[in-house]
Amino acid sequence: MVRLRIWGKNLESKRVIRQRIRRERANLDDARWIRDTERIAVAVIGHPWFVHESELYIYVDYNHEVGTRSIMAEAFRRGMNVWVPRVTGNTMLFCHIQGMEDLKPGAYGILEPTGKEIGDAGKGLMIMPGVAFDEKCHRVGYGKGFYDRYLEGHKALRRMAVGFEFQVFGEVPYEEHDICPEILVTEKRVIEGGIHMQTGLPKDPVMLLSVVNTKLRDVYHTLDELCEDMNVRREDITGKLKEIGYEYDEGRRQFV
């Protein structure tokens, strides 16, 4: 019998966690959902795993999960192969789509692919949902085990989860057979193997340039607004990018 690993008297059960997060998501207003979803999307799109990947395995959001449409749109723009899950009974497969028009409502009312080309998941980036996570990247799913079973048979996939900050706990219960994401992205930070970083601000200056310019284009009106929201010093960003020959242009709101 598989034993839960980190039970304690103050640790919420999976059932209680699922109920709590269901209420939180139901109370999430549309404006906040849009804002936080876009912040997460910008961080994902700027992450090296996304930038250098050609195969994307990604869920279609449902019922106030973190939205994935912007990520998918960017993947299509870049010419990536996009694979989306379809559930039949207890089996989940990922099928190729070329656009959102290739989707229709399927199991549980979630949009699913209509095509028949099935991905072999020999390599690629998996972006997975979840009900809750903790700061060591353990994940509480929806209780059906679809992702655990799929990832058990496709271990070459890199695993990235996305979630809102209210879905992150100090600890969540987990089991030996759980297959955890390697990276968790929220609207405020990236957690990689238990290491916290501010969302989307890598140390590498070339990657920093790409991420900051994308955030300035899609999320923030000024560099000062970005710095205040992400609690970073303006001079840290400008100094780092000056090392590779880029200066901030106030009029264009970009580093050029």
Image: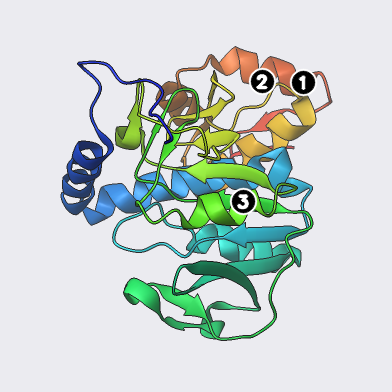
Q: Which residue is mark 3?
A: 151
Which mark, by number, is residue 238?
Answer: 2
Mark closest to the chain's N terminus, 1 or 3? 3
Q: Which residue is mark 1?
A: 242
Q: How many marks?
A: 3
Residue at the extreme right: 244
Disc 3 residue type (three-letter): Leu
Q: Determine the CA span between mark 1 and mark 3.
A: 42 Å
**Quarter of the figure that contains the N terminus:** top left
Estimate the x, y position of residue 191 in percent, counting from the top left. 53, 27
Estimate the x, y position of residue 148 in percent, counting from the top left. 53, 49
Q: Determine the CA span between mark 2 and mark 3.
A: 41 Å
Q: Secondary structure at mark 1?
A: helix
Q: Residue at x 76, y 24 (%)?
A: 204
**Quarter of the figure that contains the C terminus:** top right
Q: Residue at x 42, y 57 (%)?
A: 67
Viewer-nearest of discs 2 and 3: 3
